[in-house]
Amino acid sequence: MAQLNLAIVGHVDSGKSTLSGRLLHLLGRISKKEMHKNEKEAKSQGKGSFAYAWALDESTEERERGITMSVAVAYFDSKNYKVVVLDSPGHKDFVPNMISGATQADAAILVVDGSNGAFEAGMKGGQTKEHAQIIKSFGVKQIIVAVNKMDVVGYSKDRFDEIKHTLGTFLLRSCRFEESSVCWVPLSAMDNQNLVSTPCDERLLSWYSGPCLLDAIDSFQSPKRESEKSLLMPICDVIKSSRGQVSACGKLQAGTLQNGLKVRVMPSGELGTVRSLERDGSQSCSTATAGDNVAVTLQGIDVHHVRAGGVLCDPDVPVAFARHLELNVQLLDGAQPMLAGSQLEFHIHHAKEAARVVKIAGLLDPKTLKLEKKSPRCLLAKQVAVVEVLLQGPVCMAEYSKCASLGSVSLRALGNTVALGKVTRVIEEQK
């Protein structure tokens, strides 16, 4: 069965974690005992409606604040896929964590709150648009728009159509999703309507005859894998054991891994040997291929050389490690003007670094990407351009044409994503 890495994204309080938790419970991935415990604890804190969300929001701070802060990972099997759920935070303070989840995704569910006023808040000044643009820029081409909390609006077809028209226009025109790659599913996670089976509420049945959420997930096209290419695995997390062992965790973007294989750990350049592999959180395996989420236990290497934001790669084909880059970027709607000298936060796979725009080389036509104007003084919202940036410290990367996952970039300033783009040229590598 093929693996599908599925990001759950959307504005804060749209019900992403509740949706994910309910789906896992319905598919038997959360036991009755565990669910009862969550319900009891949630009620004792006056947050009874958070019981399903707490299946994924496990930290004390997440539960106290009632929001997801990190990317929670869970697993379930559908008819066609072994699904890895990446439940991403919606609050604007944790967009950098959401970016980390987006870099691992093959497809996404964009959850929106269908209740009156809430959808509009997510669109205007919220994270609905930002999340949609980020997942598209990181290579996600297929999405489900889950219009949640439809029970609050009485399963109104008019409300669903209004949301579909408003958000659909943005997804097709601004994000450039293909219409055939966007599936719209009205549902209620709290009421268990249209998640894993046909809805039973007549108010929804009277006008909706499309797939339930689970069937929509199964309708995704199988993601293309790059198992024949050289090994590339961006490191999302590092686990150090009390016995001095170190494991690098992440999605294997290209190539294969097997026990006993020599790998180069960048940026240190040190060699290590694969001691053991775990897939999907706990399953031991002897080999892993592109697309798998794995924990790679290494031996023969100092634990300090393995860190999040680094990359495991083929010993003979190390990834670039650089701080001076050329990017092809598009400023987002509402972004402040960008000038030479602008200070930014640079995000690429699981790495982030302070950056400065050192040169705006040219303004491009958004449709053809042909040069329109050389060396403009500044860039405005929605404009596309070639810029040079200098990072405070070097990071691992690749040109987008060689590896999309290691060449997709997000630029942020003052807590907002201001531009998305691609690495088009590594100007100077670090030795």
Image (cartoon, helix red, strand yellow):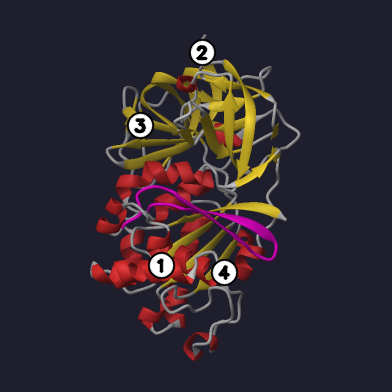
First in sequence, mark 1 or 2: give its number. 1
Whether residue 385 is visible = yes
* 247 in magenta: no
- Residue at 43% over, 79% down: 191
Q: Position of residue 376 (x, y in %)?
A: 40, 26
Q: Which residue sits furthest top?
A: 431
Which is more foreground, mark 1 or mark 3? 1
3D distance between C-alphas at marks 3 and 2: 20 Å
> In the structure shown, which secondary structural element does the residue marked by tag 2 occupy?
strand
Q: Is residue 125 left or right of residue 181?
A: left
Q: Residues within 10 Å of mark 1 (few under 14, many from 20)?
A: many
Q: Residues within 10 Å of mark 3 (few under 14, many from 20)?
A: many
- Residue topped by disc 3: 345
* 85 in magenta: yes
Q: Is residue 2 above or below residue 284?
A: below
- Residue topped by disc 1: 52
